[in-house]
Amino acid sequence: MAELLVTGGAGFIGSNFVHHVIDTTDHSVVVLDKLTYAGNLASLEGLPAERVTFVQGDITDAPLVDDLVSRTDAVVHFAAESHNDNSLDDPRPFLDTNIVGTYTLLEAVRRHGTRYHHISTDEVYGDLELDDPARFTESTPYNPSSPYSSTKAGSDLLVRAWVRSFGLQATISNCSNNYGPYQHVEKFIPRQITNVLRGQRPRLYGAGQNVRDWIHANDHSSAVLTILAKGRIGETYLIGADGEKSNKDVVELILTILGKPADDYEHVTDRAGHDLRYAIDSSKLRRELGWTPKYRDFEAGLRATIDWYASNEAWWAPSKDATEAFYAAKGQ
Ligand code: NAD
Ligand code: DAU
């Protein structure tokens, strides 16, 4: 049994990971989360108080981080400013949290010799052409496009430097686009589901040809726990579930499942610098650590996600109006 410090544990994937740890191990968890607009304590409801402790705080707060790291066996670092569109509007919080926050954690785990796992994204590799047979691998050169992805790339490079220079006991994972319950309504899939539930039309950026490689958040969590337990120190592992879909196909599927005409959506202003396609080759993780995704049926996962949003309006409604006002001001 170990105690894990999980940063960003009140966010979409961090909270999924905390539930996964409690359900599948005997570890206890301390969650460190600032509760930004993206954090929600309701995502942690139902967890046993004797195994989960919540601390509200900022990962750039060095004394707080040092104190928490000094009392933990391993750190799993999810906390981030995570949304590309926000990073185009106001990059500064992305630099503070994603770069300075990661630096603050690295210095603390260096001082205390603590095992560290760094959560990152496939966006650090830039994008692929639609017809490119290649997929991202662990040796694809970094080529980020947005303020968000460049700060995530910067944070990954800090981890690599701390491993090489200071012998940090760290691993890194880069995952593709996650979907599932408890995702903020600013993100593509929940935005379109909640639009339709509210009688509004989905909004597709540009022509909708962009491709994302979807993975259920439960599979991301099981992969991270596998890497934490069995990953080789200093290594990077790509996480993906072979889920490539165009945005247009996803919107049409959401509309069809909700009983609407498949073409009942609007094309809106495209995202600046919009990455065309992401695709992950996760064979290293599967081959070396024996991980496989369980949620391979995207339509079944999407139906369950739609059911969750339909049944949990109290969770997402408080964020919906502000999110739509933000997009409306950008013509999106
Ligand atoms: P999210 O935006 O839903 O959650 C982020 C959480 O971090 C929130 O609870 C927020 O309150 C917290 N946080 C933000 N700034 C903080 C700070 N300074 N101090 C402490 N807590 C802070 O994000 P998510 O989608 O769950 O993503 C989690 C991680 O996974 C991020 O590192 C992201 O880059 C990575 N990732 C996300 C995806 C995806 O599809 N969403 C895919 C691959 C990797
Ligand atoms: O690839 C992993 C990344 O996936 C993570 O690192 C990020 O944290 C996460 O937000 C996600 O980034 P994307 O930019 O791919 O996700 P988003 O949900 O913002 O958009 C998915 C696609 O849908 C993208 O091509 C933009 C498009 N889109 C998005 C919104 C919000 C639309 O067409 N309409 C929309 O309303």
Image (tube, rainbow, N blue to C red):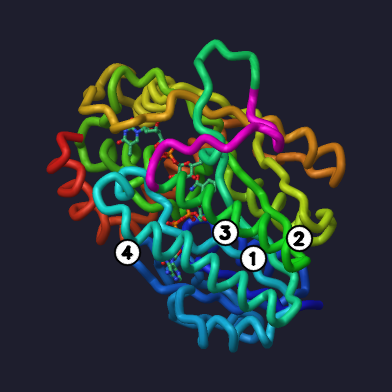
Residue that label 3 marks: 16
Residue 217 position in % (x across, y down): 58, 48
- Tell me how far mark 1 sits from mark 3, CA to CA: 13 Å
Judge depth for marks 1 and 3 and give the one in front.
1
Seen from this angle, which residue lies furthest left? Answer: 329
Q: Amino acid at mark 4?
A: Tyr
Residue 204 position in % (x across, y down): 29, 27
Of 292 and 131, the residue lying toward us: 131
Of 178 and 303, the residue lying toward us: 178
Q: Amino acid at mark 1?
A: Val
- Tell me how far mark 4 sits from mark 1, CA to CA: 21 Å
Residue that label 4 marks: 37
In this picture, which residue range is highlighted in magenta? 135-147
Q: Secondary structure at mark 3?
A: helix
Residue that label 1 marks: 76
Q: Is residue 128 above or below residue 96?
A: above
- Tell me how far mark 2 sits from mark 3, CA to CA: 16 Å
Q: Which image quadrant for residue 160?
A: bottom right
**Callout 4: 10 Å neighbours few (<14), some, many (20+)?**
few
Q: Secondary structure at mark 4?
A: loop
- Tell me how far mark 3 sits from mark 4, CA to CA: 18 Å
At horizontal 86% and vertical 42% (from top left) the residue drawn is 288
Asked if residue 173 lies left or right of residue 322, the reply is right
Task: Indicate yes or no: mark 4 CB to ligand 1 under 8 Å.
Answer: yes
**Callout 3: 10 Å neighbours few (<14), some, many (20+)?**
many
Residue 77 position in % (x across, y down): 59, 64
Q: Is residue 17 above or below residue 268?
A: below
State yes or no: discs 2 and 1 in contact (Cβ < 8 Å): yes
Numbered label tally: 4
Judge depth for marks 3 and 4 and give the one in front.
4
At horizontal 68% and vertical 69% (from top left) the residue drawn is 22
